[in-house]
């Protein structure tokens, strides 16, 4: 059963119970996972080799091929940043602070995350085109039996979703482009079958102050 | 200015004596400071002839000697190069106010070398007051170069621009420079035309573009121009039109909406730059505007793309236009596919540096891998300098790489996760670096990383006979490792170690060696105060400087050991204990 958040404050708003989630029916909330959403349990990407992930090994697709490319050695979790390591000059560090809006992109079946700068694009078309190019090679790996490489993002195989400022997962393309750029925190290319629980095309956008 | 000399030293045998004029004439042609040092050791005559004729002095560690000693020995210096802080200060391992302040040097030079023309500094602290003092004390001053320095602002540059009437070079690279506005460029007088080198790429703000444009227009000898990232593409066009003679260009921001006409004009301006051999800057570049560069790329030998987060496709488009590249710097956003493009387009490549775009982002796992490195080694057999940041590597890959490129002189591999083993076999990376030192007999500089036992250091000590600089981090199992290196690497000059299990026995095993080295740095190792004291006591010509965070712990956090003829330094801050 869902755990309540620690003492509601004096104002008495216990947000957790009233927030909309995007999990499948019957999903329990687990406050321990990365987001408060039940969705996360189906979405958790197994990043072979990078530290810090709760090693639940919840692999949303469940097939062993997910792990084919995973790294043999896991570095220690909970890595604190070491001073002066990697040895990148402070000058270079400061100078590479990015302009632009960078969001992480995860794709089901891809062994690692990518990052895109949403400000580089002017439309959904451009963005999806770029994502398709970026993730093509992984899809090829997955379809070794020479299945036709479907249109990655518009076809039946992959559905682009994004996490917005409120932590909700939405389908890409719902809102005007600029609004999307502003509210998108991260992207995910989901295998079509997993997108069932996603919010419908025009979600009533409830904020966390309750509906 | 002809200084008096003592002629005809009575001690030299008649038969082998040159007239001093001949000897000095010959020696004045020597440029290399290593040659000059050798010459000065031949005999007293030659020592004297050398010191009178030396016009440039290189001081690799500013605390190894004092300005008084330098000026006492070399009366005719016109050009000085000084390096200050230990290299690990680049990575915030040296606290602020550690030292290496140029000011006292300038004070002495103002008296002894009033005709000083050039000053090149690396990792020194330089204040605006010092820059002002410099600008007003040396009437012949021509060239200043500051690399990785701190302590000054654009006000200091204004002083230089205002007072140095014969300035040919203003080269401000990768410094921690306070930005008080771009007005300093307007300080060059309207009749000032001598500039040949102007590099302000590290400025973090606007400059007054009109002043820049007028300056570029009237300095017809300008060959190096590197602007900062606030200079836009259409402004770049105006600059290029005024300076087609440039050999070395650092662009500003390369991302701007251009009309077709602007695009064509920019392309034409680049086409007119027929002497361009170095290109850098390219901030925020995407392949959209690369075509304006193509006509200029044919003669490029050095391309610095390390501030442009390019993808592999961008490189694939650009590189075929740059067949003459000898040096290439990129970000790891180009990934292995980009490196493959390098391997197939740049057969003359001698130097490759791959920097990490996201070094501190722990849960992103992209960038370049061992296969990209292999691809480059296959296509670029002349590779001799590499700096490679990656997140995974294998022993087998490194062995293949050095087999393809046995001429490495500088091999700097940074596997970004500390103590990471061969990701395929799970073994330490000892064999990788073993292959490097066994195969690359000319190796001068080595930086190691990954999971490493003492075996790596055994290999280094046994095979790396030409090694001069070694960087160690999170490596080794015991004192034995460091001992192997100190014993085996006869030419070792600089050794810097962090976060490795080397202790007192290791430190003291180098007792006889440190005077032949420039310096030793050890931080977060197992060295105690006792051993440092012993070292300091046994070797009075070494400066042993210790930094301790914790009063109670007997271990030292950082120890910096260097030879010096100037004795312990007098400007050490309170957190530095000189033993």
Image (cartoon, coloured by chain):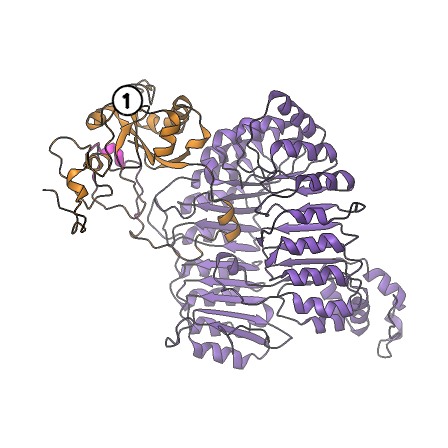
Figure quadrant of the N terminus of chain A: top left
Image height check: is B533 above or below B334?
below
Q: Which residues are magenta?
A: A57-74
Q: Nearer the viewer, residue B373 or B67?
A: B67
Q: Nearer the viewer, residue B324 or A192?
A: A192
Image height check: is A205 above or below B122?
above
Neighbourhood count class around disc 1 (C-alpha, 10 Å): few under 14, some 14–19, many 20 upward:
some
| Quadrant of the image occupied by residue B499 | bottom left
In the picture of the structure, the residue carrying the numbered disc 1 is: A157
Q: Residue furthest left?
A: A1
Image height check: is A135 above or below B458?
above
Residue B97 percent location from the top left of the image: 54, 66
- Asked if residue B34 can be seen in this view, the reply is no
Q: Nearer the viewer, residue B79 or B103?
A: B103
Left or right: A10 in relation to B21: left
Figure quadrant of the C terminus of chain A: top left
Q: Residue at x 37, y 75 (%)?
A: B553
Q: Residue at x 52, y 73 (%)?
A: B545
Q: Residue at x 56, y 58 (%)?
A: B467
| Quadrant of the image occupied by residue B335 | top left
The shade of chain A is orange
């Amino acid at each position: 059963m869902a755990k309540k958040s620690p003492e509601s404050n004096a104002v008495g708003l216990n947000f957790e119970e009233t927030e909309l989630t995007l999990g499948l029916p019957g999903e329990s909330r687990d406050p321990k996972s990365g987001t408060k959403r039940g969705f996360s349990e189906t979405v958790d990407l197994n990043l072979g080799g990078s530290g810090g992930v709760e090693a639940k090994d919840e692999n949303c697709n469940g097939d062993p091929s997910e792990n084919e490319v995973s790294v043999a050695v896991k570095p220690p979790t909970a890595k604190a940043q070491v001073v002066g390591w990697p040895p990148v000059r402070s000058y270079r560090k400061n100078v590479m602070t990015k302009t632009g809006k960078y969001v992480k992109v995860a794709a089901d079946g891809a062994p690692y995350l990518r990052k895109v700068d949403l400000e580089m694009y002017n439309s959904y078309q451009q963005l999806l085109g770029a994502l398709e190019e970026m993730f093509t090679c992984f899809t090829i790996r997955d379809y070794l039996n020479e299945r036709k490489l479907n249109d990655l993002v518009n076809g039946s195989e992959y559905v682009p979703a994004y996490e917005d400022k409120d932590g909700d997962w939405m389908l890409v393309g719902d809102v005007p482009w600029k609004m999307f750029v502003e509210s998108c925190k991260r992207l995910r290319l989901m295998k079509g079958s997993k997108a069932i629980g996603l919010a419908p095309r025009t979600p009533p956008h409830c904020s966390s102050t309750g509906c | 200015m002809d200084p008096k000399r003592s002629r005809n030293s009575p001690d030299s045998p008649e038969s082998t004596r040159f007239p001093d004029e001949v000897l000095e004439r010959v020696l004045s042609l020597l440029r290399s400071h290593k040659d000059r040092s050798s010459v000065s050791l031949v005999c007293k005559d030659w020592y004297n002839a050398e010191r009178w004729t030396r016009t440039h002095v290189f001081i690799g560690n500013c605390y190894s000697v004092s300005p008084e000693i330098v000026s006492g020995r070399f009366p005719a210096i016109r050009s000085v190069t000084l390096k200050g802080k230990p290299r690990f200060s680049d990575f915030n391992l040296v606290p602020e106010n550690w030292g290496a302040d140029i000011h006292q040097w300038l004070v002495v030079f103002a008296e002894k070398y009033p005709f000083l023309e050039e000053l090149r500094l690396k990792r020194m602290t330089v204040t605006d007051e010092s820059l002002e003092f410099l600008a007003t004390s040396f009437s012949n001053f021509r060239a200043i170069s500051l690399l990785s320095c701190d302590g000054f602002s654009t006000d200091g540059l204004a002083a230089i621009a205002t007072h140095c009437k014969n300035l040919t070079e203003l080269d401000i690279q990768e410094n921690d420079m306070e930005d008080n506005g771009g007005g300093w460029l307007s300080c060059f007088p309207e009749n000032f035309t001598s500039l040949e080198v102007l590099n302000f790429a590290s400025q973090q703000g606007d400059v007054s573009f009109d002043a820049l444009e007028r300056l570029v227009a009237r300095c017809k000898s300008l060959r190096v121009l590197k602007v900062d990232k606030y200079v836009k593409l259409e402004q770049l066009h105006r600059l290029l039109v005024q300076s087609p003679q440039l050999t070395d260009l650092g662009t500003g921001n390369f991302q701007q909406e251009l009309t077709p006409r602007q695009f064509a004009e920019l392309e034409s301006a680049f086409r007119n730059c027929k002497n361009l051999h170095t290109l850098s800057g390219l901030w925020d570049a995407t392949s959209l505007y690369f075509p304006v560069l193509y006509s200029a790329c044919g003669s490029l030998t050095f391309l610095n793309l390390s501030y442009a987060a390019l993808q592999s496709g961008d490189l694939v488009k650009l590189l075929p236009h740059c067949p003459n590249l000898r040096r290439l710097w990129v970000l790891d956003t180009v990934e292995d596919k980009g490196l493959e493009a390098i391997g197939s387009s740049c057969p003359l490549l001698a130097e490759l540096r791959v920097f990490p775009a996201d070094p501190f982002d722990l849960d992103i796992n992209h960038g370049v891998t061992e296969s990209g490195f292999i691809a480059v080694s296959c296509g670029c057999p002349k590779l001799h300098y590499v700096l490679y940041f990656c997140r995974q590597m294998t022993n087998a890959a490194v062995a293949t790489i050095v087999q393809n490129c046995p001429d490495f002189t500088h091999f700097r591999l940074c596997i970004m996760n500390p103590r990471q083993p061969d990701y395929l076999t799970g073994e330490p990376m000892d064999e990788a670096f073993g292959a490097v030192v066994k195969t690359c007999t000319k190796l001068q500089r080595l930086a190691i990383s990954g999971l490493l036992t003492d075996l790596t250091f055994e290999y280094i000590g046994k095979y790396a006979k030409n090694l001069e600089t070694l960087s160690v981090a999170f490596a080794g199992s015991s004192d034995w490792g460091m001992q192997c290196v100190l014993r085996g690497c006869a030419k070792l000059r600089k050794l810097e170690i962090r976060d490795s299990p080397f202790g007192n026995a290791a430190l003291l095993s180098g007792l006889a060696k440190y005077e032949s080295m420039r310096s030793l740095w050890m931080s977060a190792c197992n060295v105690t105060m006792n051993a440092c004291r012993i070292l300091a006591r046994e070797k009075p010509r070494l400066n042993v400087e210790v930094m301790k965070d914790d009063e109670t712990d007997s271990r030292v956090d950082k120890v910096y050991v260097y030879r010096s003829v100037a004795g312990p330094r007098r400007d050490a801050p309170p957190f530095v204990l000189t033993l």
